[in-house]
Image: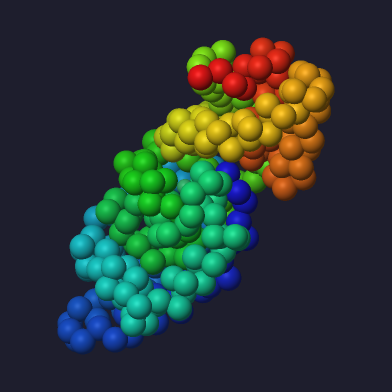
């Protein structure tokens, strides 16, 4: 997961902007009357997210007893997403938080949508709360749809609040298959608490990152196989190994838990791989 800077958007002002062009006066009045609920929800969300207690966020299907879930969802789908919607500039601003356009959740695919960290179908008051909207790829967005935490261990990682790249936690090992393949696993550092360990495992499993990274690794092997043959021909396994370690170093300089770091390290550490296993078909 890639840490993102939280958005600098005022939840109340943004909600007011989103509903500014609602033509149905009765609906507009009801939406306006729950503005304090939306503001309070954003404050509550932030306080709970910092303490990993979002599971305590109270679900309410009719916001303030006045606005239904589908009406709040429509504020997002009609007043924020369309290109001409009053909230679209904020949508684009949130998307731009994903540096290099990468999905912060899988750190691999392109971000192409906004993910409701707590789903709007269950937490309608958070439908357009900036802190609840995270740029993501469509695969991660779909994979997270059903996530309703009931305790801290079930809270998926939030890129605005969680930062796990200060520690190394992603590793891989070579499988002596034909062709060679990689198995990615989470090995948490000893100083992480049990909640963080569970959350990172949950993140990894929910988003299917082992399979995603294994597929990327398989593709990378196809890309470098010809070069590895040349290195092996000139200097044997040790030349292959030093080339792979150099690539791991280069990838590590970019991001310590990038799948490439683990992949190249695993390749380099495998005697079987370096001594021709890379060419198994
Ligand atoms: Zn993703």
In the picture, the quarter occupied by the N terminus is top right
Query: What residue do we see at 34% from left, 46% from top?
Result: 142
Q: Residue at x 43, y 42 (%)?
A: 55
Q: Is residue 249 left or right of residue 123?
A: right
Depth check: give the residue in front, 187 or 40: 187
Residue 30, quarter of the rendered image: bottom left
Please state if 210 lies on the left or on the right of 124 as rendered.
right
The reply to whether residue 54 is in sight is: yes
Image coordinates of residue 259 in percent, x first then y, are 61, 36
Classify residue 194 as left or right of residue 65. Answer: right
**Vertical relation: 95 (above or below) 198:** below
Q: Position of residue 54 (x, y in %)?
A: 46, 46
Q: Is residue 85 left or right of residue 95?
A: left
Residue 212 vs residue 169, the one in the foreground? 212
How far from the left and from the top, in percent, is residue 95?
49, 65
Report the label total: 0
Is residue 166 in view? no
Above or below — where is 195 with respect to 78? above
* Residue 257 against residue 105 in the figure, above or below: above
Q: Report the residue at 54% width, 51% height from top.
A: 104
Where's residue 2, x and y in %?
60, 49
**Residue drawn at (51%, 52%) of the image:** 103
The residue closer to the viewer here, 117 or 39, is 117
Task: Report the coloring of the rendering.
Answer: rainbow
Question: Does residue 171 sit above or below 39 in this rendering?
Answer: above
């Amino acid at each position: 997961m890639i840490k993102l800077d939280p958005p600098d958007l005022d939840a109340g002002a943004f909600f007011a902007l989103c509903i500014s062009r609602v033509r149905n006066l009765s609906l507009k009045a009801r939406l306006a009357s729950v503005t304090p609920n939306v503001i309070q929800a954003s404050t509550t969300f932030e306080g709970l997210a910092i303490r990993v207690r979002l599971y305590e966020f109270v679900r309410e299907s009719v916001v303030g007893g006045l606005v239904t879930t589908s009406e709040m969802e429509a504020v997002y789908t009609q007043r924020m997403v369309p290109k001409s919607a009053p909230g679209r500039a904020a949508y684009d601003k949130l998307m731009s938080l994903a540096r290099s356009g990468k999905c912060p959740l899988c750190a691999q695919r392109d971000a192409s949508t906004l993910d409701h960290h707590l789903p709007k179908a269950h937490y309608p008051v958070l439908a357009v709360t900036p802190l609840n909207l995270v740029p993501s790829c469509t695969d991660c967005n779909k994979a997270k749809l059903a996530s309703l935490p009931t305790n801290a261990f079930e809270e998926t990682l939030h890129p605005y609040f969680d930062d796990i790249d200060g520690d190394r936690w992603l590793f891989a090992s070579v499988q002596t298959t034909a062709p060679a393949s990689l198995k990615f696993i989470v090995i948490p550092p000893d100083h992480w608490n049990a909640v963080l360990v569970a959350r990172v495992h949950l993140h990894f499993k929910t988003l299917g990152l082992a399979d995603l990274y294994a597929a990327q690794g398989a593709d990378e092997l196809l890309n470098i196989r010809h070069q590895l043959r040349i290195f092996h021909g000139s200097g044997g396994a040790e030349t292959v190994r030093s080339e792979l370690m150099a690539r791991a170093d280069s990838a590590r300089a970019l991001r310590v838990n990038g799948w490439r770091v683990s992949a190249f390290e695993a390749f380099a550490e495998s005697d079987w791989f370096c001594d021709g296993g890379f060419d198994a078909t």
